[in-house]
Image: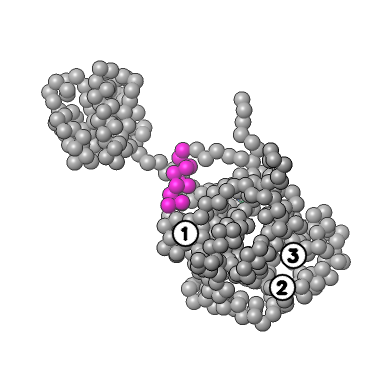
Amino acid sequence: MIQLIKGFKDILPGEVEIWQQIEKITVSLLEDFGFKEIRIPIMEHTELFARSIGEDTDIVEKEMYTFRDRSGDLVTLRPEATASICRAYIQHKLFAKEPVQKLFTIGPMFRCEKPQKGRYRQFYQINAEIFGVASPLVDVELIVLLTTLFSRLSVSDIKAHINSLGCPECRPGFKAALTDFLASRTENLCSNCARRKDRNPLRVLDCKVPGCREEMAESPSLMDYLCPECLQDFESVKTNLEALNIPFVVDKRLVRGLDYYNRTTFEIQTGSLGAQNAVAGGGRYDGLVKELGGPDMPATGFAIGFDRLAEIVRLNIPEYVKTPDIFLAVLGKQNQSLVFEWKCALGIKGVKAEMDFSGRSLKSQMKRADKMKAKHVLIVGDNEIKEGSAILRNMVTKEQVSIPINGIVENVVAKL
Ligand code: AMP
């Protein structure tokens, strides 16, 4: 039998309803916060990701699904959405109409990582980006949006981790200090970090390998190197989060796996997921729009890991299935066409109706209705049709009433 590709997954009925519920609540909240949806393709020129995410990152070095298409162009299945949204913002000159743009998108991302619980090769993200605002208040707004969303989804075991990555003025000083710190510790680092430590020492800070984590416990902190503007900016983020009663921790190791971030960076972590504890991450990326050929435009955003969020929500609601409003139990195959007409008419009126096409006994049809958790059952056989009235049974109260077949659809709707 042909199986699905390693690291890819099916989202089956029963779980899909949780995804739909999350999407509905998220989209409504994003719209309340002034975001508009943008839909971008899942494939782009490889160069877009190489230039934005950074050559020395895990994603670009070894995780992208990159291949030549039939015309020989090098293309990549998107590993994240921010670069594509920036490309669209620049390409369609959205900034010329209105520099401040608040955009969101929902869809699959592809990274050829080692599959494990909470880590897939095709996974879904909910992305939100704000272009054109330099104020750190919009970074706070994004964190407020995330904490509000999690509270609406009854996800409680979460904490915001924040850090500042500085700017091109102050980060080089920190990089130099970090490089000095790492110089004497190469032999204890994993092979990835040992290789990258000179070109991109910040990557070592967020390496998950236990040996590297131990080694970095005493590393210098970017906080001590921030320029006055970055420091003031970060203080403003903290003060405003406190004023809004949003719990957070300053996490000096939080550098994130993509190169384009600067200043405020954040991650929402949860205790409910084990090792893959980041359910959302984001931050400011002021230089990216210019780097990709657009105007010098500040920007900030986040990505929620949809799969991980659905996993946490599922822990609270083990199953979310829409049950039928009514099950039509029909006796005698000769009556099926008529009852089928009623079923269709009910569906058109927005009533979730199910019926059995097997011609089985009333007992087995009632069993099936029970199993589907139908709220009502309509019983129709030769006798009912002869007498001109069907039986409507309320499956919760077990109460039964007789309802006229003449105008049955309206009669049923009135009784539900
Ligand atoms: P990133 O784009 O790496 O900043 O990731 C943002 C969020 O996407 C993370 O906090 C995770 O929740 C989720 N995520 C990233 N990679 C994966 C993956 N391979 N499988 C499932 N979720 C992921």
Element type at mark 3: helix
> Extreme bottom residue here?
228
Alpha carbon distance from label 2 to label 3: 14 Å
Q: In the rendered view, does 97 fall on the left or right side of 177? A: left
Can residue 205 be found in the magenta stretch? no
Q: Please name the residue shown 47% across and 42% down the image.
A: 16
Q: Please name the residue shown 36% across and 32% down the image.
A: 371
Looking at marks 1 and 2 on the same chain, the residue that comes earlier in the sequence is marked by: 1
Q: Which residue is mark 1?
A: 36
Q: Quadrant of residue 201?
A: bottom right
Q: Quadrant of residue 198?
A: bottom right
Element type at mark 1: strand
Secondary structure character of the magenta stretch overall: helix
x, y percent for residue 375? 29, 38
Q: Is residue 86 above or below residue 337?
A: below
Q: Residues in magenta?
A: 13-24
Q: Nearer the viewer, residue 341 or 179?
A: 341
Q: In the rendered view, does 42 fall on the left or right side of 243? A: right
Alpha carbon distance from label 1 to label 2: 31 Å
Q: Which residue is mark 2?
A: 168
